């Protein structure tokens, strides 16, 4: 018989958060999760920074006027762990579903654009911090590091994710593929001026290039944003779909750009296997002239203990120098 790879039902949510209101956004997330779980979803994905929305002010007004909204975002951001993450975890445990949700993560005096991964028992499996905030977002969010860029082994496959503009970088997606990613979370915030062909093309490309099923979830920019910020941004800006591994074929969706809803697809990881023999760029289709050296260390501003030994590339404890070419430390 051989092995049989997992099969499961995925749900991707397209909705607007309750803008800059953490508690109300958590409540809305729980209602949406309940609906998706009630329809049999094993994996439920909510959009980028759904708790509690994206920093549209950074893109659309000058900093001195915008900083008051950054302050409000900070005060409504999510500590990990906290009551907010516990509520999402309770939903995952109650319904026995994996949940992935985008949050503004507060850590000390900084905010990060973060994806949180919950397992079926409601535990936080891990998180992915956006490696490099895009454009004006740098005025609000800090940068992630390699310690949160990984793939999680689950009973529905090896799962990873990227946030918004990270999909335009070649190496974040490539490294997830090299880690054996089978299920990819493509998390996006509703666009205020970009066309949604960006989220569609990047998400479908990832499915084709890395033979991974892609659960693409994008939030809606709604009138709450305009009312709060005193702007006149176009409402909508969302593209949500579930995409087949290897082909980029749309399995479910997309919804209309301003329509709230949940889409579903039955995913069979066995269907991806045939594509491994056509283009598997991190395996036998990998051109050996190109190699990536990935730094998975956590970068901290304050490090206690013994200083690094000479020649160990600045690591603490065990040296990782042998994992990198000699000249990478120079």
Image: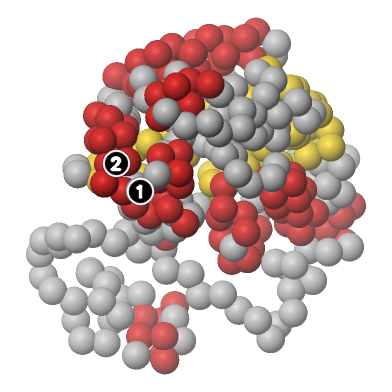
Is residue 271 toward the left or the right of residue 169 in the image?
A: right
Name the residue located 83 percent from the left edge and 47 percent from the top edge. Answer: 248
- The image shows residue 78 at horizontal and vertical percentages of 32, 30
* Residue 113, visible in the rendered structure: no
Q: Residues within 10 Å of mark 2 (few under 14, many from 20)?
A: few
Is residue 198 toward the left or the right of residue 278 in the image?
A: left
Name the residue located 66 percent from the left edge and 33 percent from the top edge. Answer: 238
Residue lying furthest left in this view?
305
Above or below residue 165? Residue 125 is: above
Name the residue located 19 percent from the left edge and 44 percent from the top edge. Answer: 109
- The image shows residue 166 at horizontal and vertical percentages of 56, 55
Is residue 267 toward the left or the right of residue 14 in the image?
A: right
- The image shows residue 230 at horizontal and vertical percentages of 42, 28
Using the image as rendered, state which of residue 309 and residue 83 is in the foreground.
83
Is residue 290 toward the left or the right of residue 273 in the image?
A: left
Mark drawn on residue 52: none
- In this figure, which residue is indicated by the disc labeled 1? 62
Label 2: which secondary element: helix
Name the residue located 10 percent from the left edge and 64 percent from the top edge. Answer: 305
Q: Quadrant of the N terminus?
A: top right
Above or below residue 126? Residue 308 is: below
Q: Quadrant of the C terminus?
A: bottom left
- In this figure, which residue is indicated by the disc labeled 2? 65
Between the C-alphas of marks 2 and 1, the distance is 6 Å
Above or below residue 128? Residue 174 is: below
Using the image as rendered, state which of residue 203 and residue 300 is in the foreground.
203
**Marks 2 and 1: CB-CB under 8 Å?**
yes
């Amino acid at each position: 018989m051989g092995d049989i790879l997992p099969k499961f039902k995925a749900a991707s949510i397209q909705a607007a958060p309750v803008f800059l209101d953490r508690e109300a956004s958590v409540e809305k997330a729980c209602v949406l999760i309940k609906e998706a779980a009630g329809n049999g979803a094993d994996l439920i994905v909510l959009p980028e920074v759904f708790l509690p929305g994206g920093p549209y002010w950074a893109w659309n007004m000058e900093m001195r006027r915008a900083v008051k909204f950054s302050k409000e975002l900070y005060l409504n951001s999510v500590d990990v762990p906290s009551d907010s993450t516990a509520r999402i975890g309770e939903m995952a445990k109650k319904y026995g579903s994996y949940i992935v949700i985008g949050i503004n993560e507060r850590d000390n005096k900084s905010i990060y654009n973060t994806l949180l991964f919950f397992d079926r028992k409601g535990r936080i499996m891990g998180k992915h911090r956006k490696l490099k905030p895009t454009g004006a977002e740098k005025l609000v969010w800090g940068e992630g590091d390699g310690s949160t860029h990984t793939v999680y082994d689950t009973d529905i496959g090896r799962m990873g994710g990227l946030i918004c503009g990270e999909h335009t970088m070649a190496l974040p997606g490539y490294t997830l593929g090299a880690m054996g990613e089978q299920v990819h979370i493509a998390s996006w915030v509703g666009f205020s001026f970009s066309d949604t062909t960006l989220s569609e093309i990047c998400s479908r490309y990832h499915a084709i290039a890395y033979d991974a099923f892609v659960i693409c979830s994008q939030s809606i920019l709604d009138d709450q944003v305009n009312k709060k910020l005193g702007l006149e941004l176009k409402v909508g800006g969302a593209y949500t779909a579930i995409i087949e591994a290897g082909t980029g074929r749309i399995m479910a969706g997309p919804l209309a750009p301003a329509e709230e809803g949940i889409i579903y697809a039955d995913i069979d990881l066995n269907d991806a296997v045939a594509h491994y023999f056509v283009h598997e760029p991190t395996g036998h289709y990998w051109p050996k002239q190109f190699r990536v050296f990935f730094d998975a260390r956590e970068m901290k501003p304050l490090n206690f203990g013994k200083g690094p030994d000479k020649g160990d590339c600045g690591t603490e404890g065990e040296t990782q120098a042998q994992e990198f070419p000699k000249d990478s430390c120079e």
